[in-house]
Image (spheres, rainbow, N blue to C red):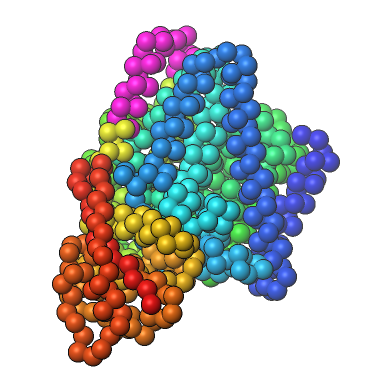
Amino acid sequence: MKKRSATILAAYLMAGSLLEFAAFKLEKGWSVTAAWLWLFTGLAVLGFFVFESLYMLAGDIKEKRFTLVFLFAALNALLLFFIGNISFSDVNADACQQLAAGLDSFKKADLNYTGKAFLGYPNRQYVLAALPALLFGRKIWTLQAGFGLLFIIAVNLLVNELRRYLREKELREEYAYVAGFAFPVFPFITEYYMNFEQAFTPVALSAVLCALYLRLCRKPDVFTFVALSWTGCFLSGSYTPALALLGLFALFLILRIIYYLLNGTPFLSELPLLCTGLIINAGCFFIAGFKSRADRVGETREKGKILKTAFDAWKDFFGDKNVAFFGVFGAVVIIYMLLSLLLRLKIYDFAVSVWVLGVVFASEYMKGYTSYDKAWMLQRNMIVIPVLITSVFTAFVRFLKKHGIEIKQFVLWTVIAAFLFIGIGNFMKPHRSFAYFKYVQPMKYLISDIYDSLEEYGLKGNDSFAVVMYTDNSLQSNLRDYASFFFPNAKIYSESGNAFDENIQVSYEEGFVVFAFAEDERLSELEAPAYECSAFDALTAAPQKYSEHKNIRYDRKNSWYRKVFKK
């Protein structure tokens, strides 16, 4: 790297760090500048990732490497298939509130850059996820794309960097797709991908971090450092488990600095100094926003008992005691970690294994926002999956290169086909770690039916109207949470039993459309109020419509009854 470019980069890192402190401490115009610089830098970085993937695809097509073209298409089709496809994927009430906050951010000059949103988590992560909805409207597919596209970009980025890694090793680039198709083999990846919520953002950033580190080793250019800076800083403002990635980020950069020094690079030369600058930059972002976090970063579940907690956590984690975490990869991961901890692999592998043990311990020991059962708490450990996939894959590639082994085409296709088959099977399975979502499946079909009803009556999601929902399932009584994203100006009534809410009469204005839904036929059997009520009369007289949806993932049918009336 040229000295002038390194100087500009160093100035950029320093200015970004100081701007972050100014945004939190001084606010005013500083937070506006910091917010838009962060957003535009992120869009430029992610846009370049997409461009590189398409550029490599175009090169594969031009050079008639159709095997690579097919693998690229198959992997992306698999992941894109579930976005907006509610026969399989979920509409998450928490995600609705998160993206509602993200969309509200665009009403503020500084995008609520230093603010908090859902349950006190940093708001800026929702700004990025809200962009599809901002551009294309509040729809089911834009909700899911907000959290899903970052992961898809990350997986493609990692596969591309592994392809370049294989190219340097003079091995076939198709091997990289073994790592790509390994992601859905992990049961937690498919379960939480289909949930499309903030818990999956750190997983995507974990894959981005792995890819960028490979890129740093291969090509430490200006873009690599800018992308690493943005990713490292984004980690400090994401869902809590991402903070563990900050530690790995710093650790790997320290190891890279040591590598440079051992190979005769003076510490005061460009690359060691810029790596140090990245660590300081990410640390400044974390420190600047630490006091504003409300997600209980420093609280522990119980005082003392550290060793017992650690061993219990590791035993449960590696033994798949509460719910399968590694699936078929359990033995592979254990063998890799044992070899690395015994220093039979590289120092990077040793660092990864120690970090994984630390993450598993922290996920059990740290309190987090609330207390759930252990099966659900394991989702905090998802961030280790991209790191382990990358580390195990590169260790295996080194083994192949060292012994001059080339995998036969038949074996390669068999492995990829097996991974694809297992992955599709995982996508088809109901929720296992957090049983709550099993009981709210009908809600996504209610949202779909409301959208169909709006289109039928010439309305849009952000228009004013009313929705009345009757259900005896207390877990489905939070329609307002969903409406915060899909129907922000709607009046929402959630009822149980057969009573008619008198508040509906109050909002029953001229031309105001009311959509009433029930999980059974009770709309025709509601108790009449003791007073004259034109809204109730209109509801009683309205024709009833029935809709039925096939829930393929749960192999059941969900139905809703609907009546529509207006003054």
Q: Of residues 235 and 503, which is closer to you in this image?
A: 503
Task: Name the residue at 46% across, 23% down.
Answer: 71
Quadrant of the snapshot with the C terminus: bottom left
Left or right of 484? Residue 124 is right
Magenta stretch containing residue 539, yes or no? no
* Residue 17 placement (x, y as % from top left): 68, 58
Q: Residue at x 26, y 79 (%)?
A: 536
Query: From the viewer's perspective, is 27 left or right of 562?
Result: right
Can residue 385 be seen? Answer: yes
Residue 534 lies in quadrant = bottom left
Q: Nearer the viewer, residue 431 or 535?
A: 535
Is 80 left, or right, of 284 in this rendering? Answer: left
Q: Decide which of 330, 50 is in the foreground and name it.
A: 50
Q: Where are the magenta residues, as a range?
A: 397-423
Q: Is residue 292 left or right of residue 179?
A: right
**x and y percentages locating residue 291 in the rendered image:** 53, 70
On screen, residue 566 above or below 68: below
Magenta segment, prevailing SS (helix, strand or loop)? helix
Task: Please say whether residue 310 is visible from this viewpoint.
Answer: no
Task: Please provide percent x and percent y for residue 246.
Answer: 52, 51
Q: Does the magenta segment cover residue 410?
A: yes
Question: Residue 560 at x, y = what percent?
Answer: 25, 58
Q: How many marks?
A: 0
**Image quadrant occupied by the N terminus:** top right
| Nearer to us in this view, 351 or 493 | 493
Q: Is 166 placed above or below 328 here?
A: above
Tell me the residue at 34%/47% (across/down). 86
